[in-house]
Image (spheres, rainbow, N blue to C red):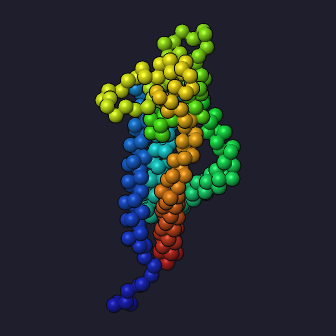
Amino acid sequence: MSGNHYKGHEVSCCIKYFIFGFNILFWLLGMALVGIGLWAWSEKGVLSNISSITDLGGLDPVWLFMVVGGVMFILGFAGCIGALRENTFLLKFFSVFLGIIFFLELTTGILAFVFKDWIKDQLNLFINNNIRAYRDDIDLQNLIDFTQEYWECCGAFGADDWNLNIYFNCTDGNPSREKCGVPFSCCTKDPAEDVINTQCGYDVRAKPDSEQKDYINVKGCVPQFEKWLQDNLTLVAGIFIGVALLQIFGICLAQNLVSDIEAVRASW
């Protein structure tokens, strides 16, 4: 009848455009990370020889950009387009995908706490595998150097772990000038030096153990990482809790929007 207006369910514009705006940032950031990864692979000639992706004995850091960027791109796309077009399939996919990520993070955290010794052994194995491949990939080399400089450490559990690398081992048949040495990132820093001495680790492991500490950091990266976690436990826990709350908030918003959309459609 004239003068009467139908009052039914409505889709919340606030929720809709909040999900859209939040996820478009994730979408763009994901594209940027994937783009950086592809550019890095292009510079290393990987794209012209795809089989070389699996040739590296250690971790190619570009994989971190590709995997994280890919997940962010898919998640951002589903949330952004799903909210904008009021597509319940994409919104449900967004919620489920986010829920799976949250479950995996929670499971990983619990397992890491329960199986601390096993995690330590796996971390040691992982670092040693990357030590072997130190000279094989420039990105991996930079990652190891950054880690050793940041945590002031050398090797997984000590400088002698560099015996695993063919250029740094102390065997008689090693012709390398870096024989019985360590990378410059193991060296103790002299505040007076403006230029990095990349040869500071040469022959240092040929010296007695009591003298090595005057030239390099003798502590391993695994113990230093454990110490860093203990010293920054509040910060790390705060970050994990913050990320978890954001994920739960995103799932709840998406499900709320799906309910509104389905209610509106049911009232047609």
Report whether residue 140 is seen. no
The reply, left or right, for residue 3 in relation to residue 133 is: left
Q: Is residue 193 left or right of residue 220?
A: left
Name the residue: 54% across, 50% down.
229
- 115 displayed left or right of 174: right
Q: Position of residue 29 (x, y in %)?
A: 39, 48
Q: Give the percent coordinates (x, y) of residue 26.
A: 41, 52
Residue at 42% in and 57% down: 23
Judging depth in this view, the residue of 40 and 199 nearest the camera is 199
Q: Position of residue 33 (x, y in %)?
A: 42, 42
Q: Report if residue 1 is visible in the image.
A: yes
Q: Residue at x 64, y 42 (%)?
A: 120
Rendered view: 93 above or below 8: above
Front position in the image: 51 or 140: 140
Q: Quadrant of the N terminus?
A: bottom left
Residue 258 position (above or below residue 6): above
Against 191, residue 108 (above or below) is below
Number of disc labels? 0
Q: Quadrant of residue 168?
A: top right
Along the line of sight, the residue nearer the viewer: 239 or 154: 154
| Image quarter of residue 118 | top right
* Residue at x 66%, y 39% (from the top left corner): 121
Residue 166: x %, y % from top left: 57, 18
